[in-house]
């Protein structure tokens, strides 16, 4: 009897959560899965963490493969990931596992496609200033994994980054990402080494009456 009640409660919990096809929708429209400059979407929290103020409260699951060897996230090969969004609250936040950082992947692939990519990534995003005209958001990203099976080469990687952003009124957004640690060992040989610099990217979006204007560096 207790088991039946628990199963019923579990089913009711998940059926009350809205279903989103957020990532696949962005990719089908030719946008990056980490957010869009033009389209309103829950995954925009990875572009500008202040967008957590615009997200509803829900649970997200994406079934698919792991992504330690290469970027696998696409319409044909989805990436396993998911998390809990606690948006539109006095202190909104999101806890997310498995999101791929496209910037880190691009930098490592430029050095060698054989370096491990950030995998089992943990993201924590939170917002401040809820209810105010100007709202803020912060985020942290962390990844650490190893693989000593492929071609008998010991490979490992570590990645950590900070994100910050703001919603200024109804039309302006500013945001940035700062790479704190970006390291990988073992590509074609055990002594191969990659050490990324302290990367910084900043961007802004202005939402006009008919068009969105944006820039990112």
Image: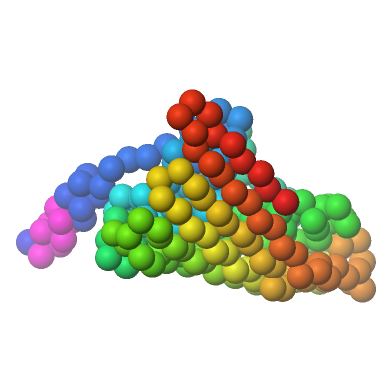
Total count of labels:
0
Q: Would residue 54 be visible to someone looking at this image?
A: yes
In the figure, is residue 131 to the left or right of 149? left
Residue at x-position 35% and y-position 56%: 133
Main SS of residues in magenta: helix
Task: State whether residue 22 appears in this view.
Answer: no
* Residue 130 drawn above or below residue 54: below
Picture layout, residue 12 above or below residue 155: above
Q: Where is residue 31 drawn, in percent x and y?
A: 59, 35
Where does the N terminus fall, quadrant-wise?
bottom left
Q: Residue at x 82, y 53 (%)?
A: 109
Q: Nearer the viewer, residue 111 or 89?
A: 89
Tell me if 122 is positioned left or right of 127 in this view: right
- The residues colored magenta run 2-9
Residue 17 vs residue 158: left or right?
Answer: left
Q: Quadrant of residue 91?
A: bottom left
Q: Dividing the picture into quarters, in which one does residue 69 lie? A: bottom right
Q: Position of residue 22 (x, y in %)?
A: 45, 39
Give the residue displayed 66% in from the left and 56% down from the top: 202
Q: How is the image coloured?
A: rainbow
Task: Tell me where residue 67 appears, x and y as whole percent.
Answer: 65, 53
The residue shown at (49%, 38%) is 207
Give how far across and how far down residue 107 sits, in percent.
79, 56
Q: Which residue is at the front of the view, 21 or 147?
A: 21
- Quadrant hosting residue 142: bottom right
Magenta stretch holds residue 101: no
């Amino acid at each position: 009897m207790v088991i039946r009640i628990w199963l019923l409660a579990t089913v009711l919990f998940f059926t009350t959560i809205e279903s989103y096809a957020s990532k696949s929708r962005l990719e089908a429209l030719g946008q990056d899965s980490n957010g869009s400059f033009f389209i309103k979407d829950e995954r925009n929290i990875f572009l500008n963490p202040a967008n957590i103020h615009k997200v509803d409260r829900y649970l997200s699951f994406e079934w698919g493969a792991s992504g330690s060897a290469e970027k696998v996230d696409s319409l044909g090969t989805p990436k396993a990931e998911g998390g809990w969004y606690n948006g539109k609250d006095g202190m909104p936040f999101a806890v997310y596992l498995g999101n791929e950082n496209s910037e880190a992947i691009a930098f490592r692939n430029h050095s060698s496609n054989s370096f491990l990519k950030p995998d089992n990534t943990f993201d924590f995003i939170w917002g401040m200033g809820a209810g105010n005209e100007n709202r803020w958001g912060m985020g942290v990203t962390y990844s650490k994994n190893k693989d000593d099976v492929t071609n008998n080469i010991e490979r490992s990687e570590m990645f950590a980054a900070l994100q910050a952003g703001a919603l200024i009124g109804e039309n302006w957004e500013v945001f940035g990402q700062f790479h704190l640690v970006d390291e990988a060992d073992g590509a074609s040989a055990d002594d191969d080494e990659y050490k990324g610099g302290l990367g910084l990217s900043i961007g802004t979006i202005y939402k006009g009456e008919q068009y969105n204007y944006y820039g990112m560096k």
